[in-house]
Image: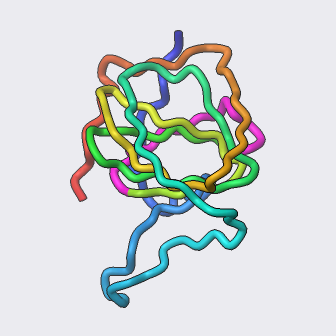
Amino acid sequence: MSELPQSEPLSPEAFAPFGTVLRRDPVGEPFQNVHIDTASRGWRVALLEVSAGPLRRVHRHPDTEECFSPLHGSPCIAVAEPDDPTAIRVFRLDEPVCVRRNVWHEIVAVAQATVFIAENAVVTGEPFELATTLAWAAEGRVDRAPR
């Protein structure tokens, strides 16, 4: 068993290869579009309960983007670009993100967490089982960074 990469703070610049951090402009209008997907064929929302544990697989969706928003606990999102599912980076999921199509991803946590998900109503996916399970380092506990 290997260790998960150290979690990184979430920023629009660092997350750009994988998707968008969903932030509103604080000086803009009260209602702001932060992400639009014109290819959507209906959509759904879901709640995901994430148990503490290692990362065993990632998956991707060729037909939909997927939005994740933390609700409870300190979840992280493991992501990798389409051409290398083993080049995993881990970000603290302390604000909403939208993962692009074909980006490898999985939600992970060091303790129970709940995540809100919005995606197409019908989703196809491709799993990738990691050759080596990636576990949290003993000192790799994730705490929310101050905003």
Residue 28 left/right relative to 82? left
Residue 142 left/right relative to 37? left
Name which residue lies at 33% across and 26% down: 110
The stretch of residues the image draws in magenta is 81-95
Question: Where residue 63 appears, x then y in whole percent?
Answer: 74, 53
Question: Where residue 53 appears, x then y in whole percent?
Answer: 41, 20
Q: Is residue 29 magenta?
A: no
76, above or below 37, in the image: above
**What coloring was used for the rendering?**
rainbow
**Residue 19 visible, this angle:** yes
27, above or below 136, in the image: below
Q: Is residue 91 magenta?
A: yes
Furthest-left residue in view?
Answer: 146
Furthest-top residue in view?
Answer: 1
Question: Where residue 57 appears, x then y in whole percent?
Answer: 61, 25
Q: Nearer the viewer, residue 85 or 112?
A: 112
Q: Which quadrant of the figure contains the C terminus?
A: bottom left
138, above or below 117, in the image: above
Name which residue lies at 65% across and 35% down: 59
Residue 120 left/right relative to 67? right
Name which residue lies at 30% across and 29% down: 112
- In which quarter of the view is residue 26 placed? bottom left
Magenta stretch: helix, strand or loop mostly: loop
Question: Where residue 139 appears, x then y in whole percent?
Answer: 30, 22
- In which quarter of the view is residue 132 placed? top right
